[in-house]
Image (cartoon, rainbow, N blue to C red):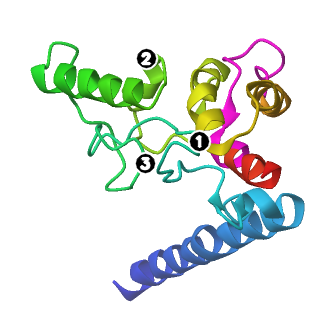
Amino acid sequence: MLTQLRPAVVLAAGALLLFGLAYPSAGTGISQLLFPHQANGSLTSNGSTLVGQPWTGPRWFHGRPDPDNPLRLDGVSGASGGSNLGPRSRQLVAAVRAAGVQLRRLGVDPTADLVTSSGSGIDPDITPQDALSQVPMVSRSTGIADSRLRRLIRALTVGPELGFLGPSYIDVLQLNAALARLR
């Protein structure tokens, strides 16, 4: 029995050391060496560019609403994940309508993305159209000219990957950081 148990224990210990320690350590070391910014969560002084940040008030560009509370357009985090409400859900329809009313009060002609949450609920990006629809609100509250805000949006727009994969987008954190520098 011991002669059969010993090879099994040695193999299990070897596999644990190789796949549980050496392989992850090598992957972490290589990623830290070659991609340190990404490996550390793409952090900036304001948070991660990979996670939607909370923005309150009309002086900031807003991302997509938080699915935990779609009426809060500031991305205050709860658990990440979609609301699991289907297109015929009365609760979803009421929340989307209420978010649209709230945005119109702020002077924004809401796009579909600005009144519906993303699947994860922590999407950091919006489309250029989403940002452009918020220009009148931000301009009115900050005193920055519409034309200057539009130039800022054009400058920060990231095109589709490889020129054709996916839509153009803007990271709201980077847009608002650039907006803060304009002031």
Pick whichever of labels 3 and 1 is earlier in the sequence.
3
Residue corresponding to mark 3: 75
In the rendering, which numbered label is found on residue 17? none
Quick check: 92 left or right of 20? left
Q: Is residue 93 visible?
A: yes
Q: Amino acid at mark 1?
A: Ser
Separation of marks 2 and 3 at Cα, in angstroms: 16 Å
Q: How many marks?
A: 3
* Residue 116 visible: no
In the image, 54 versus 118, the foreground residue is: 54
Q: Secondary structure at mark 2?
A: helix
Q: Which mark is residue 141?
A: 1
- Look at 77% across and 25% down and name the residue there: 150
Residue 102 position, x and y percent, is 33, 31
Q: Is residue 50 above or below residue 139?
A: below
Q: Secondary structure at mark 3?
A: loop
Kind of element beneath mark 1: helix
